[in-house]
Structure formats: C-alpha cells, structure tokens
Image (cartoon, helix red, strand yellow):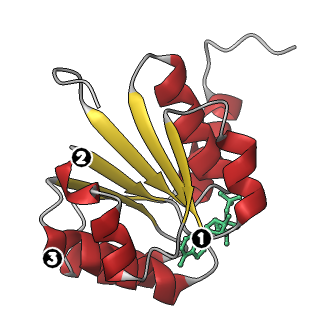
Amino acid sequence: MAKGKKQFAVIGLGRFGASVAQYLAKMGYEVLAVDENQERVQDMANVVTHAVSADSTDEEALKALGIRNLDVVVVAIGQDIQASILTTLILKDLGVPRIIVKAQNELHGKVLSKIGADKVVFPERDMGLRVAHHLISPNIIEH
Ligand code: ATP
C-alpha cells in the first residue's frame, strides 16, 4: 500500500461497516475490508482496495493480512459480541495504533473500553439522539 495517507481496515461488512469502508474508499483512502461472509466480501470487492474473507477471531489470519501495519482498524461486528471482543483484544495485542469498535449496548461498550478500544461507537443510539434533537431544534424547517 502507498505511504503517506492513513491506511484503514474495516472488519465486519454489515450496514455500518460497509458504509464506513465505502466512504473511506470514496475519499481516496486505502481500505482493507474483512468479513467471514464471502458474499459480503464480494460485494465490496470493487469498492475498496482489498476485500478479504477471514475470521477475525483467528489471530494468525489477522497477522497474515498484515493488519498490524495499518493506522486505524474499525471493528464493525454487531450481533456476535464475543467475536467483537476477541477481535478487539487480538488487534490490541498486535499493536494496532487506533482501534474503533461498534458496540451493541452499554455493557459491551464498557468491556471494549476496558480492553483498550480507543473509541467505542453506538451508531443506533447516537442516530436516535440525533433524530430526536433535530425534531425539537427550533431552526429546522420541517418538510
Ligand atoms: P449492521 O447493523 O451494521 O448491519 P449488525 O450489527 O447486524 O450489522 P452483524 O451483521 O452481526 O452486525 O455483523 C456484521 C458483519 O460482521 C457480518 O457481515 C458478519 O459476517 C461479520 N462478522 C461477524 N463475525 C465475524 C468474524 N469473526 N470475522 C469476520 N467477520 C465477522
């Protein structure tokens, strides 16, 4: 991968992960997209720099992908909380400089922070708050 610009990986290509990966690629960044689901990997193949099928709870698989050399890794695994936690732990052990993780709920988020996630995001909760905020914001013109 070319030097200079930040390099990203997105693990888990559900709606959230796919959208993060797509936007980064659109903005000209190199993105490694990873999912254990072959179909989801196929869908991203023409969008990002590299799309690979792998189980992110397999440390050797992540090592082989050279993920430790990337600047930022986004863990966007939703339902499988165990996989999300194990993946984060492995990335931390590998020395990834910045790890951003999507949390399913508050407790999941707490665990992620404790094991060293640099940022924990709650997309559904935050979007709900944003929508509510917009609804009562005085300078919004209603359509
Ligand atoms: P979203 O709301 O963003 O659509 P979600 O919260 O429903 O997603 P899931 O669909 O459960 O999340 O997971 C997102 C993706 O993570 C899926 O495509 C799934 O295949 C992938 N995934 C889950 N576990 C692993 C794993 N161990 N290794 C790689 N990918 C994984």
The answer to whether 99 appears left or right of 130 in the picture is left
Disc 1 and disc 2 in contact, CB within 8 angstroms? no
Q: Secondary structure at mark 1?
A: loop
Q: How many angstroms separate mark 1 from mark 2 (CA)?
A: 22 Å
- Count of all numbered marks drawn on residues in the image: 3
Residue at image point 32% right, 79% down: 60
Q: Nearer the viewer, residue 1 or 90?
A: 1
Q: How many angstroms separate mark 3 from mark 2 (CA)?
A: 14 Å
Disc 1 and disc 3 in contact, CB within 8 angstroms? no
Residue at image point 39% right, 30% down: 30
Q: Nearer the viewer, residue 91 or 130?
A: 91
Image quadrant holding the N terminus, namely top left
Residue 23 higher or lower than 101, as above or below: above
Q: Indicate which disc, 1 or 2, sits on the residue closer to the N terminus.
A: 2
Q: Secondary structure at mark 3?
A: helix
**Ligand 1 within 8 Å of the CB at mark 1:** yes
Residue 28 higher or lower than 116, as above or below: above
Query: Amino acid under label 1?
Result: Gly
Q: Nearer the viewer, residue 131 or 22?
A: 22
Is residue 89 visible in the rendered image? The answer is: yes
Tell me the number on the disc at residue 70: 2
Give neighbour class at mark 1: few <14, some 14-19, many 20+ (Cα, 10 Å).
Answer: many
Dividing the picture into quadrants, the one containing residue 40 is bottom right
Q: Secondary structure at mark 2?
A: loop
Q: Indicate which disc, 3 or 2, sits on the residue closer to the N terminus.
A: 2
Give neighbour class at mark 2: few <14, some 14-19, many 20+ (Cα, 10 Å).
Answer: some
Tell me the number on the disc at residue 93: 3
Q: Indicate which disc, 1 or 3, sits on the residue closer to the N terminus.
A: 1
Q: Residue 17: percent from the left, percent from the top?
A: 57, 50
Residue on which the image places disc 1: 78
